[in-house]
Amino acid sequence: MITYLVVAGVGLVVLLASLVVGVLAGEIRIGGHGLSGPAIGDAAVVFGLVGALAVANDLSTVQAAVSATVGALLAAALTQRAVNRLAGRPDPAPLPLTGAVGVVTAPTGPDGGEVALDRAHEHRLRLAWSDEVLPTGTRVVVVSVTGNRLYVARL
């Protein structure tokens, strides 16, 4: 039973590393098909837990190994299918910023500054510049976008 629990623990580490760090997010090719880090980690966790449950319920060594292998293969297939479906979705196009309204959060002028836009899901400050010096708290509208900087004007 200890062996199965160790495999489950290692699988959990692989699963978490591939989800959090992304180091194992690439595919490992086996034949013509690939397995992602989450699929490998998930398969190891299921293998270990099903094997440990089988041993705890007094199944033979062969029955435990077969049960664990079938569970692991099923888990890997389902997880890889989910990963493939998610990876196949295109990233949404960024919303156009021209015309967006916001407020100056750091004095903004020809040398630059910062603004916060009043948009849903906009939770960051953006670099901005304007022709005139605008004090903090001034309402502005985005006139254009150059790279990651916004050209703003008083509203």
Image (tube, rainbow, N blue to C red):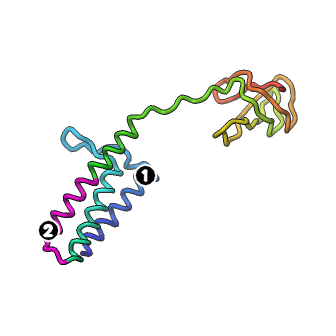
Determine whether label 1 and label 2 are within 8 Å by CB: no
Residue 132 falls inside the magenta stretch: no
Q: Nearer the viewer, residue 123 or 22?
A: 123
Report the side of 107 relative to 66 (left or right).
right
Q: Main secondary structure of the magenta part?
A: helix
Residue drawn at the location 83% of the way across and 26% of the way down: 155
Sequence-first tag of 1 and 2:
1
Position in image of residue 132 (x %, y %): 86, 25
Read off the residue under disc 1: 19
Name the residue type under label 1: Leu
Judge the density around disc 2: few (<14), some (14-19), many (≥20) Cα neighbours within 10 Å.
Answer: some
Q: Give the residues drawn in magenta, as a range.
A: 58-75
Position in image of residue 8 (x %, y %): 31, 65
Q: Quadrant of residue 3?
A: bottom left
Position in image of residue 13 (x %, y %): 38, 61
Read off the residue under disc 2: 63
Residue 74 falls inside the magenta stretch: yes
Name the residue type under label 2: Gln
Report the side of 129 relative to 77 (left or right).
right
Label 2 SS: helix
Residue drawn at the location 41% of the way across and 49% of the way down: 23
